[in-house]
Image (cartoon, rainbow, N blue to C red):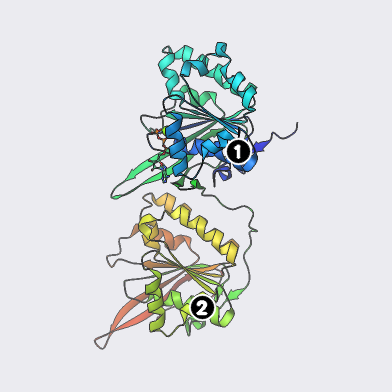
């Protein structure tokens, strides 16, 4: 039997949840609480279909007048009215009976007229108003789905959820091919987080789990968290000298390429300076491209820090040898950053990476198991990309940071920076705690 054809929705990152696209002719249930982004996702499915794949589209709404839909779409950058004028789209506001009851032949008629390939129905929750008996409703919905299949439409069916309960499932979920849930989760003291989860997909693979997504001008972007299978797995035997005086001696020449090193220490112990020097020396001595990801300090501060050590960071940035990426942690979700990072590393051939500081990013990951998984994936990515990285970690001084233990156990190397007192003066010391796949000199060393 020939493989069933897949179609790309065109929604950024969404297709990756399904290994490239959804099966043509699928019925996709998009459910979520108010404001979860259901309509936006559905409109984009139709819009991208027309714009990028030449699929004529159909939008059927019950309560929302076309005018408000046009307005909302325009705010995202999509001129639906222009597409209607070109006969590529039809927006219909009607009553649920017309669509649900087969006698009306409504869908057949419209599809005949428009040659639509994609349809959005917003929302099927209105079907509850016209059929009150649950068994009858189920039968009607089943016939409706069959009709969509018969007309070879790939459809997004929006369903309103009053409660976002993990184990609460409606009959519609059993009848459609794909179920996608959009969550808009509240988090103590922080902005709500949008996540998307595929609950089922008949006859095809999907990435499980809740993946973060954003809505902004231009549409929806999903950040699927997955292991990139296309990167050859294998550990390089190359050794990367850090270029930092004395440090390479302790490392017995350098770090195995692709190693992720946790550089931890209390505030002021010199983590950022060490990270910066690692990139500067890499660029100056070995022509390695470097990326400094700052989650707290704006680029101006990093430049000031560099100037204090007489590093001409500005020149290195101008020449494209070092990039400074400032992502204020309050607005940055770890999964989004991981994906942006790996794309950047591949695009620019980044060999050295510094993340400063890691806790700013991971402190919002409440579940320690999830944290272990995320750090494991990150280090595996970086390892496979051959990008040797420093994750800077600010330690609190009471030692009850449970995340630290997990990160330290997952990464391949860890270096602790600390203070000690010598003749009434603070002295900085450095200790290499562990280094997988590389020998090193143990003990505390002044720096
Ligand atoms: N132009 C835009 N720029 C940025 N964000 C936007 C824009 N348009 C919509 N949004 C975001 O999307 C959210 C609404 O999305 P949408 O209307 O798709 O939700 P919905 O799930 O369909 O809600 P409802 O259940 O009320 O129909 C808004 O609350 C807003 O946060
Ligand atoms: Mg809506």
Q: Is mark 1 within 8 Å of ligand 1?
A: no
Q: Which residue lies most toward the right here? A: 1
State the separation of the CA atoms marked 2 and 1.
44 Å
Say which element carries label 2.
Answer: helix
Per the image, the residue denoted by label 1 is 50
Q: Which residue lies most toward the left here? A: 424
Quadrant hosting ligand 1 = top left
Q: Which residue lies most toward the front here? A: 85
Closer to us: 140 or 352:
140
- The vertical placement of 54 against 96, above or below, is below
x, y (%) of residue 193? Answer: 38, 46
- Report which quarter residue 118 is drawn in: top right
Closer to us: 382 or 447:
382
- The vertical placement of 241 against 50, above or below, is below
Query: Can you say which quadrant of the picture contains the C terminus?
Result: bottom left
Res. 316 mark: 2
x, y (%) of residue 149? Answer: 62, 24
């Amino acid at each position: 039997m020939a493989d069933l054809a897949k179609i790309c929705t065109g929604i950024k990152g969404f297709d990756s949840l399904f290994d490239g696209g959804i099966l043509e002719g699928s019925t996709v249930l998009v459910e979520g609480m108010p404001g979860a982004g259901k309509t936006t996702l559905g409109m984009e499915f139709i819009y991208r279909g027309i714009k990028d794949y030449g699929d004529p589209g159909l939008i059927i709404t019950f309560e929302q007048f076309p005018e408000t839909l046009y307005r909302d779409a325009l705010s995202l950058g999509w001129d639906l009215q222009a597409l209607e004028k070109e006969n590529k789209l039809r927006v219909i506001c009607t009553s649920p009976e017309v669509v649900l009851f087969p006698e009306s032949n409504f869908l057949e008629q419209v599809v005949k007229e428009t040659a639509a390939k994609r349809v959005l129905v917003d929302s099927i929750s209105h079907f509850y108003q016209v059929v009150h008996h649950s068994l009858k409703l189920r039968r009607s919905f089943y016939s409706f789905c069959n009709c969509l299949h018969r007309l070879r439409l790939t459809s997004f069916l929006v369903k309103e959820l009053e409660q976002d309960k993990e184990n609460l499932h409606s009959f519609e979920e059993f009848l459609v091919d794909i179920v996608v849930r959009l969550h808009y989760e509240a988090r103590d003291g922080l902005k709500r987080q949008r996540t998307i989860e595929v609950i089922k997909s008949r006859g095809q693979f999907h990435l499980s789990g809740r993946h973060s997504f954003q809505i902004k001008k231009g549409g929806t972007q999903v950040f699927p968290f997955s292991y990139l299978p296309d990167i050859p797995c294998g550990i390089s035997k190359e050794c990367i000298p850090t270029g930092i005086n004395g440090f390479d001696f302790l490392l017995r020449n350098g770090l195995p390429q692709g190693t992720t090193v946790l550089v931890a220490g209390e505030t002021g112990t010199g983590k950022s300076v060490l990270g910066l020097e690692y990139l500067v020396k890499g660029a100056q001595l070995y022509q390695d491209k470097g990326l400094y990801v700052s989650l707290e300090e704006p680029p101006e501060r990093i430049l000031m820090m560099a100037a204090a050590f007489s590093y001409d960071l500005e020149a290195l940035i101008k020449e494209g040898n070092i990039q400074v990426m400032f992502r204020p942690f309050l607005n940055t979700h770890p999964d989004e950053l991981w994906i942006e990072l790996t794309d950047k590393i591949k695009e620019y051939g980044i060999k050295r990476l510094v993340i400063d500081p890691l806790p700013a990013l991971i402190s919002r990951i409440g579940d320690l198991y999830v944290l272990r998984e995320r750090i494991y994936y990150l280090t595996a990515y970086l390892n496979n990309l051959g990008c040797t990285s420093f994750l800077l970690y600010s330690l609190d001084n009471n030692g009850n940071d449970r995340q630290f233990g997990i990160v330290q156990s997952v990464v391949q190397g860890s270096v602790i920076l600390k203070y000690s007192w010598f003749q009434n003066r603070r002295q900085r010391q450095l200790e290499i705690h562990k280094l997988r796949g590389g020998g090193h000199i143990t003990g505390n060393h002044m720096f």
